[in-house]
Image: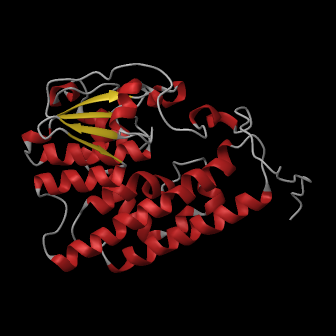
């Protein structure tokens, strides 16, 4: 390794807001609101404040899957939170999520705020009795994989993704460190999916919905332009799982919500009713699945 910079940590760390690269502005060493702003609220039982990132997609995929099953109580209003402009630090958003991270959910019927994507998935699965097995052993296995994802994804996004794609400079040590871990994680998933159709068994669950936006997109070569670098084609069982889930209409729709990038037919910046999707033809939805 040849990344010796001669850097010595100071005795007391000070915040340099310009040193973090493209996404430096969304991080700071203190919590709380930076400005006063109320969140919008629609007419539906669930109010979602999010963005179409992998963490945000977890929740919109589940909500769209619930609606596909006819769960009318899962109708939701979705409002984009522009994290690049610091909207997550508004007083309204901080009141819903003191950690200032998307996604955040308000259940108007119960008055419950729910933050952290895994907590939201579990909350909704239990609320509607869907996508989480009732058998204790099967439920435990699904929870194993849900929590695996919550613990593993930061190594992919904040670790590998940051240093490989977003850091202002490339350094061999962190890229090698996080590449090794991400490839190990993909191998963990690949071995599991060699034995089971889905994560944790033969049922499609919130464990799959949590994991697909991160590792499904990664193994399909759609994250960080790193497909060749990571040799994603070699993870055949993970790829089979990822391609199968990508074809689900609710997954396609969930990936469009609060998404401010890509072709217009793949975006739905605010979602307030199932009819919002009527302008999207089935052909366009199918095109989105191949993204």
| Residue 201 visible in the picture | no
Q: Position of residue 221 (x, y in %)?
A: 53, 53
Asked where in the image residue 141 lies, by quadrant, the reply is bottom left
Q: Residue furthest front?
A: 12
Left or right relative to 35: residue 248: left
Residue at the image point whose x is 42% and y is 19% from the top: 36
Residue 252 x, y percent position in the rendering: 31, 42
Q: Position of residue 157 (x, y in %)?
A: 55, 51
Locate the C terminus by quadrant: top left
Residue 60 figure quarter: top left
Residue 8 in view (yes/no) = yes
Q: Is residue 133 above or below residue 171?
A: below
Name the side, left or right, on which 277 lies relative to 52. left
Q: Is 104 drawn above or below residue 179 in the view shown?
A: above
Q: Nearer the viewer, residue 47 or 53?
A: 47
List x then y, in percent, for residue 125.
Answer: 19, 55
Is 123 left or right of 182, judged from the image as shown?
left
Which quadrant is home to the N terminus?
bottom right
Look at the picture and state if 36 lies above or below 18.
above
Residue drawn at x 34%, y 80% is 195
User: Is 178 left, or right, of 67 in this rendering?
Assistant: right
> Residue 23, located in which quarter of the rendered image?
top right
In this rendered view, identify the residue nearer to me: 132 or 228.
132
């Amino acid at each position: 390794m040849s990344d010796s910079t001669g850097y010595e940590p100071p005795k007391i760390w000070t915040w340099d807001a310009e040193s973090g690269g493209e996404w430096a502005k969304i991080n700071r060493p203190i919590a709380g609101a930076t400005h006063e702003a109320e969140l919008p609220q629609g007419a539906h039982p669930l109010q979602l404040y999010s963005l179409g990132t992998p963490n945000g997609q977890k929740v919109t995929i589940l909500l769209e899957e619930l609606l596909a099953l006819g769960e009318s109580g899962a109708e939701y209003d979705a409002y984009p939170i522009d994290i690049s402009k610091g909207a997550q630090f508004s007083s309204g958003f901080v009141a819903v999520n003191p950690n200032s991270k998307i996604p955040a959910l308000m259940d108007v019927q119960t008055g419950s705020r729910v933050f952290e994507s895994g907590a939201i998935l579990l909350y909704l699965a239990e609320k509607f009795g869907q996508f989480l097995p009732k058998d204790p052993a099967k439920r435990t296995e699904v929870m194993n994989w849900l929590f695996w994802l919550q613990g593993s994804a930061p190594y992919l996004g904040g670790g590998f993704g940051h240093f490989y794609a977003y850091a202002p400079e490339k350094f061999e040590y962190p890229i090698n460190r996080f590449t090794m871990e991400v490839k190990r994680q993909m191998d963990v998933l690949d071995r599991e999916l060699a034995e089971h159709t889905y994560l944790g068994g033969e049922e499609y669950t919130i464990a799959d919905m949590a994991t697909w936006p991160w590792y499904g997109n990664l193994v399909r070569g759609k994250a960080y332009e790193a497909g060749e670098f990571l040799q994603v084609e070699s993870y055949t069982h993970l790829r089979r799982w990822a391609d199968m889930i990508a074809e689900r209409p609710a997954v396609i729709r969930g990936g469009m919500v609060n998404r401010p990038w890509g072709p217009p037919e793949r975006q739905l910046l605010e979602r307030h009713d199932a009819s919002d999707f009527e302008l999207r033809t089935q052909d366009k939805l199918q095109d989105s699945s191949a993204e």
